[in-house]
Amino acid sequence: MKTQSAKAKGRRLQQWVRDLLIEKLDIHPEDIESRSMGAGGEDLIMARAAREKFPYSIECKNQEKLKYVWDCYDQCKTNSGKLEPLLILKINNKKPLAIVDAEYFIHQQ
């Protein structure tokens, strides 16, 4: 994939998360912006009002090499019945991570 296409793919994910936060948490659109691709730091820049509603630092990754995570999440979802799937991932020398559906997570805030 060309660099420009990869950046556009990542930018679309950042904008999707931004729009979801605006819609679900009633954040003013001027209080949250998607950082340009390649810039250092958080992917979404939030004003104080937005940070008070959603006190998280967001990093967005839209890459095929992460496919294994979705395979694991699909298994979790299959086994969850009527409960919300929660996937816990761990690799050597790293802390475990919790994975939940993004829309579910943001709606819970």
Image (cartoon, rainbow, N blue to C red):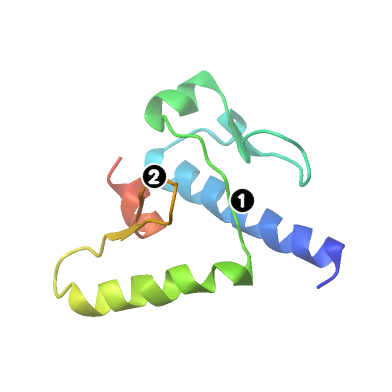
Left or right of residue 47: residue 80: left
Q: Residue at x 63, y 41 (%)?
A: 43
Could you tell me which residue is drawn at 15 percent across and 66 percent down? Answer: 83
Element marked by disc 2: loop
Q: Residues within 10 Å of mark 2 (few under 14, many from 20)?
A: few
Q: Residue furthest left?
A: 82
Given residues 92 and 69, the one toward you in this image is 92
Q: CA distance from mark 1 to mark 2?
A: 25 Å
Residue 62 is labelled as none
Q: Quadrant of residue 4?
A: bottom right
Name the mark on residue 95: 2
Image-based side of 81 in relation to 108, left or right: left
Q: Is residue 94 left or right of residue 12?
A: left
Q: Amino acid at mark 2?
A: Lys
> What amino acid type should be assigned to the residue bearing mark 1?
Gln
List x then y, in percent, for residue 29: 57, 36
In the rendering, at what x and y percent does residue 2 appear?
A: 85, 69
Q: Quadrant of the N terminus?
A: bottom right
Q: Secondary structure at mark 1?
A: helix
User: Which sits in the foreground, 105 or 40?
Assistant: 40
Residue drawn at x 62%, y 51% is: 15
Residue lying at 61% horizontally and 51% vertically, measured from the top left: 14
Q: The C terminus lies in which quarter of the figure?
A: top left
Q: Nearer the viewer, residue 61 or 108?
A: 61
How many numbered circles are shown? 2
Residue 39 in the image: above or below residue 53: below
Picture coordinates of residue 73, whole percent (x, y): 36, 70
Q: Residues within 10 Å of mark 1 (few under 14, many from 20)?
A: many
Residue farthest toward the top in the current orientation of the protein: 48
Name the residue carrying label 1.
14
